[in-house]
Structures are given as structure tokens and as C-alpha cells.
Image (cartoon, rainbow, N blue to C red):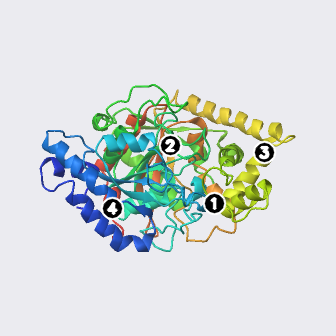
Amino acid sequence: MHHMTLAEIARGLADKKFSSVELPQVLLARIAQLDPQLNSFISLTEELALSPAQAAAARRANGESGALLGAPIAHKDLFCTQGIRTSCGSKMLDNFKAPYDATVVARLAAAGTVTLGKTNMDEFAMGSANESSYYGAVKNPWNLEHVPGGSSGGSAAAVAARLLPAATATDPGGSIRQPAAFTNLTGLKPTYGRVSRWGMIAYASSLDQGGPLARTAEACAILLQGMAGFDPNDSPSIDEPVPDYSASLKGSLQGLRIGVPKEYFSAGLDPRIAELVHNSVKELEKLGAVIKEISLPNMQHAIPAYYVIAPAEASSNLSRFDGVRFGHRCENPENLIDLYKRSRGEGFGAEVQRRIMVGASALSAGYYDAYYLKAQKIRRLVKNDFMAAFNEVDIILGPTTPNPAWKLGAKNSDPVAEYLEDVYTITANLAGLPGLSMPAGFVDGLPVGVQLLAPYFQEGRLLNVAHQYQLNTDWHTRTPTGF
């Protein structure tokens, strides 16, 4: 059962080959056996899984047949889940139990999913390696000495190791797509505003976006169908009809115009990854796509702009964690200022403190115009580059990451080196565009992903391209040894 995709599980449940009660029992036993190697979960909810599993079985017995009805999943531990610890990978929220469900959690529960637990993550989604978690680093199932990517590394490692078929994740700057690339999964960051952020603990509000992580584009389509839609509780949520993503998978790629930016193939890209990207281009050409070289001239400015905007928003969002209302509180504070200082100093890890300080500095008097305002102007230039490109092509293709997954601890002493690993992913967040990473091969036994970007609300087109590619390749079917 653990090798089945979401679509195969739906068919198996419909054909009564197994029940929605039996399936989570099998997977929870597998998690207990294998997750100590990976550290992909922060909390398990085995005691709470039985009731929704039984309810899903009853709904199927009454004639319902939804693709997610009875499907076991897990949530990244920044989606609020009522009565269950929602830690955001931080000591600051280690004792926090959310009083309500995030919109994503509520919608997937209504669709009949069975939640098995909350997955590990970089603290407050700040990181590209899943090493900043208060609960310890997550390990990559393809090589336990390497990182799984971040910040959604727990979701990625769990799905890649076949502990569950799919999981929710979030992507403020590549945190779905990069872990997907590092663990041989398909990961989709939807258009900003397509999936509600309500109940999703904020890192950078203008960049954060929830999305699915799974083994195939078909499974991502199924999970996104349950997640997407307008939410009046989330101010950036856009009231745009949600199409049938599964129906969009079948379209032909004949005549599809794919742009390959020349800026992606700079000296910073591992030449072995470049070769795999070119191989993917050739495969899509065989399916009828037309390839065109394009330019994104302002891409070189994206990293510095992003690492001003994101920390600035983080410094504002995380100011609420002060030891007064909820979360970690220091022992025996001398006064209010001491309470603030020690609660935040004890509750936040080094990477979170670093980004808060950078963001507070960028927003301070005398620096706002020089840094934050200039970064926002660069953001607009990045968006304009994409809008011009999409006048010429339908999809943009390139590497998801410049390198394969690195060894645990290899970049801990040089945070800037880790930030540079986001060079291909952050532009989609700055512009608010949808992006998808799909498996495209291996380098030294480690997975490599290819990224697809599309115009706003064209998630169906991304899923279509990835699905057709996966029908003609087998990278996504490979399983890590031992799992």
C-alpha cells in the first residue's frame, strides 16, 4: 500500500481492495519503523486518525467517491490544526495548540482526508535545508548524510520515503519546489492568492503560499483541488474559479511554446544539472513542444531583493511572539523589557534571529528608502521580465536548483551560500507566479528537478506538462534504497 499514489489509493478505495481504516494503520506502522532515521515528523496524530478514517469509510459506503475521501496525508507544522501542537519548527511555539483549523486543513478534512501528523520544517519556514528546526535536522531518504531541502523538508522526506502518499507544504521562496527537487518529488507553488493563507503561520506575507508535495503531477492535481479556492478570511485571496485540475492533465503538448532563459545557465549551475535540463527539453520537444531561448535580465538582482523583502516582513510578523500572550515565556522576568528580550532570545533560533535583525534594519529610519523601497522596485522589474517573456512563450523551463542536495552541516557556517541555492525559485515568489518542480534525473545518486513557471492561475498548464512528461519518463517512479 505504501507505494501507491493518491490516484491509486482513490481507485483502490473505490474498488474496495482495502478500507480507509486499514490504510492509515499500515502507514502509521511504517512511520514508527522508519521515521527515526529521517526525523520527518514533529507530531503524530494516530489517535485522532481513526475517527476521520471511519467517517470516510461511512461516506464511501453511502455512495460518495471523492478522490481525497479516505486519503492519508500530513500537514507541514505551520498549518494550524485545532487542538494539536502547531510549532512552526520552533521552541517559541513548542507548547502552542491551535484553537482552530487553517482553511487548508479544514478544506482537506471536509474532502475526507485523514491526517497522520505534522511534519518537520525549518524554523518559521526560514531555511533551505531543514536544519534550523528546534526538533533537529531532517535527513534526505536518498542519502541520510544529505539535506532534504527546506523549509518543507519534513513533508518532502516523508513522501519520498513512502511514509505517506502526499503532504501539504508552503513556499515563500522555493520551499516546496527545492525539497521536491532534492527528494525526487513533484511540488507545486500555486499563484499567490490561489490557496488561502488563513491559519498558516506567517513568515513573509506577500510571498507565502501553500501547495502540494507528492510523487506525481496527477497526485498534486488531486491535492490542489482540495486546497484551492477563495477565502474571505484571507485578504490576498483571489475570487477566481478553480478549474478541474485532473481534467487538465490530458491535454496535448503539440505547439506548446517553452522558453528557456539564457540567464539560468551561468557559471553557478552544476554542468551535470544543466545536461539533465537539456535532456528534459529534448523530451518535451518529442511531445510536440516548441523551444525558444528567452531572457530574464533582472534575475541577477532577485536574491538581494528577496533577502531584504522577506526578512523585513518576517521582522514584522514575528513581533507578535513576545512572551505575553502565547508561546514561549522566559522564567522569572525582572520587568517587561526583560520578558521581551529573554523570551525572544530563548524562543527563536539563530537563523530566525538573523533574519529578524536584517529585516528590522532594512525597515529602520534612514535605511527604508535605500534598501526596502529599492528591493520593491526590483521586484516590479522581475515581474515585468516575466510578463514580457509570457508574451512570447507559454511556459518557462529551467533548473529548480543550481546544485544537488548538499551534506548536512556543509553550509551552516555560510548562510549566504545557502541563500544562493534559491536563485531559480525566488523569482516566482517575487512575481507571484505559479511554479512546479518535477523529477528529471540524478547526479551522484541524488535527485535533480526541473522547474516550470507559467502565467497567473495557469497551474493546470504546469500540471499538464509535468504529467505528460511523467507518462514518457520514469524518474518519478524511482524509490530511495531502504524505503
Q: So how many labels did they put on this image?
A: 4
Mark with earlier residue (1, 4) = 4
Query: The residue tagged with tag 3: helix, strand or loop?
Result: helix
Q: Which one is in front, 393 or 33?
A: 33
Mark with earlier residue (1, 2) = 2
Density class for disc 2 (Cα within 10 Å; few <14, some 14-19, many ≥20) is many
Question: What residue is shown at x 40% (from left), y 45% (from top)?
Answer: 105
In the image, is residue 447 above or below residue 37? above
Disc number placed over residue 46 in the picture, else none: 4
Which image quarter holds the N terminus?
Answer: bottom left
Is residue 448 shown to the viewer in this render?
no
Q: Could you say where residue 229 lies in the image, as x and y percent from the top left?
A: 41, 32
**Which one is closest to the eye, mark 3 or mark 1?**
3
In the image, is residue 213 above or below residue 387? below
Q: Which residue is mark 2?
A: 199
Mark with earlier residue (3, 2) = 2
**Which one is closest to the eye, mark 1 or mark 2?**
2
Q: Are marks 3 and 4 in contact (CB under 8 Å)?
A: no
Give me the C-alpha separation between circle 1 and circle 4: 35 Å
Q: Which one is in front, 294 or 386?
A: 386
Mark with earlier residue (3, 1) = 3
**Which one is closest to the eye, mark 1 or mark 4?**
4
Amino acid type at image mark 4: Glu
Q: Are marks 3 and 1 in contact (CB under 8 Å)?
A: no
The quarter holding residue 388 reads top right
**Which one is closest to the eye, mark 3 or mark 4?**
4
Is residue 304 shown to the viewer in this render?
yes
Density class for disc 3 (Cα within 10 Å; few <14, some 14-19, many ≥20) is many
Give me the C-alpha separation between circle 3 and circle 1: 21 Å
Q: Which residue is mark 1?
A: 418
